[in-house]
Amino acid sequence: MTTSQPTPLRLGIAGLGTVGVGVVKIIRQKANVLAARTGRPVVITAVSARSKDKDRGVSLAGYAWEEDPVALAKRDDVDVFVELMGGEEGPAKDAIEAALALGKDVVTANKALLAHHGHALAQTAEAKGAVIRFEAAVAGGIPVIKALTEGLAGNDITRVMGVMNGTCNYILTRMQDAGLPYDEVFAEADALGYLEADPTLDVGGIDAGHKLSLLSSIAFGTKVDFDGVELEGIQRISIEDINQAAELGFKIKLLGVTQMTGRGLEQRMSPCLVPADSPLGQLQGGTNMVVIEGDAVEQVVLRGPGAGEGPTASAVMGDVCDIARGFRLPTFGVPADMLTTAKSAQSNSPAPYYLRLALEDRPGAMAKIATALGDNGISIDRMRQTRHDDAHAPVLIVTHKTQRAALDAAVVAMRETGVMAADPVALRIEAV
Ligand code: NDP
Ligand code: HSE
């Protein structure tokens, strides 16, 4: 009697940069353990990238080369298309669509693509009996999608929040630790290769917003709504803000919060002050943290590396292994046709705000600002004007709890006074 050999799972990998090379290394180094864990060999049959001749520091021997990722996705010897090129349009989207059209499963780390086209792609996948997995797209090496879709499946999720962009957290913590200005640390991050090809994706909060919109969909069973994320980046955070926050007992973090309220789905990604001694406040460098709250579990905190070759490849391999085992889930945890269209709501939960202003140093300037706040029902908790040599006085105000809408109205009124050099830096103080 002959024993039949398990059928190998054959991968085609498009993109051999940081993440792609990490995946190739794991598959080459851990073939035996992967086969033992999944019950079948996991092999690479073909790869694609822009430059065939580039030395990638890993052997590609034995893999067919395709110039065109779409051709790779369509190959008969590829069961799973692994998209690690990036980009919300173009070859990544074309190749994923080509794979799905043939009923092939897809693994991707591409949060930009899914934030914009996730629902349509999920519908295509389900119509073709294929799955799309994207653990690596959110919070790098942290298995947050697995946590939400599997371990916490018995919960009504009430809120998800966290730090989801390693580059911003690196910049903010480095400014704090080294006392360096934003521009200098930004240049350092660039030199270290931390920034996305378009750095605005990182520092503008867009990349983290993409991730938050994907988590919202899974947590609340809604269609991905990236346009509904209130976005603010870290570009205006100065070393003064970092220092002032520290004196008040806070750290500044690019914090994402998503929650379903009676008014609709609130999604915001913005720099906030969080208590320095809180788990989020203590997060250093490129580390990410996601806090999930559910009715049964109460609170779960996940912390880990948010980017980089090993951590991101680790997340990709978790998805690949699930497919190899035959474990299949709809893209966003429930069938695409069951995902609802959430009404997007501006967050209006009251919070204290930190305001940094540069005021003309002339009689009555401060009074005008106080009036603009008072007229909008905002009460000042603390206020300080520091010594200065130039024409504009640096003023710090901490308000009592107020709603964002009232603060926005107050900023409009402050602008009309003509005593500010620029709009204030306004940061929510989050009790986490
Ligand atoms: P890289 O820029 O390091 O690599 C991109 C790869 O895609 C390169 O190998 C490049 O080829 C290839 N590529 C780009 N365009 C094409 C094309 N038109 N045809 C064929 N190949 C192409 O990116 P990363 O590895 O950093 O990121 C990949 C994905 O993973 C992105 O979606 C990113 O957002 C996501 N991600 C990345 C993380 C990280 O830490 N780096 C963390 C989490 C997610 P060549 O090498 O020849 O130029
Ligand atoms: N640019 C992203 C970050 C990469 O810094 O977190 C990981 O998604």
Image (cartoon, rainbow, N blue to C red):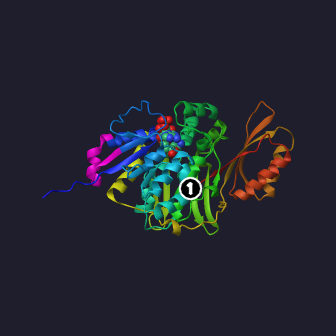
Quadrant housing the N terminus: bottom left
Instruction: State the residue in front, 373 or 381.
Output: 373
Q: Which residue is mark 1?
A: 117
Q: Position of residue 86 (x, y in %)?
A: 52, 44
Q: Is any atom of residue 184 visible in this view?
A: yes
Q: Is residue 314 above or below residue 402?
A: above
Direction left: furthest residue: 1
Rendered residue at 49%/58% (across/down): 292
Q: Residue at x 35, y 53 (%)?
A: 321
Q: Is residue 29 on the magenta stretch?
A: yes
The x and y percentages for residue 239 are: 64, 36
Q: Quadrant of the C terminus?
A: bottom right
Based on the picture, tell me whether residue 371 belongs to the magenta stretch: no
Residue 366 in the image: above or below residue 6: above
Q: How many marks?
A: 1
User: As rendered, which of 258 and 414 lies closer to the eye?
Assistant: 258
Q: Quadrant of residue 421?
A: top right
Q: In x, y percent, where is residue 266?
A: 62, 61
Q: Nearer the viewer, residue 389 or 184?
A: 184
Q: Where does the magenta region start and end?
A: 28-44
Q: Is the CB atom of the residue marked by disc 1 within 8 angstroms of ligand 1's nearest atom?
A: no
- Measuring from the top left, give residue 199's x and y in whole percent: 60, 39
* Residue sitting nearer the eye, 225 or 399: 225
Circle 1 sits in a helix, a strand or a loop, which is it?
helix
Q: Say whether residue 117 is left or right of residue 37.
A: right
At label 1, the amino acid type is His
For the point 85% across and 47% down, which residue is it? 417
Residue 282 appears in the picture as rendered: no
Crowdedness near tag 1: few (<14), some (14–19) or many (≥20) residues, C-alpha within 10 Å: some
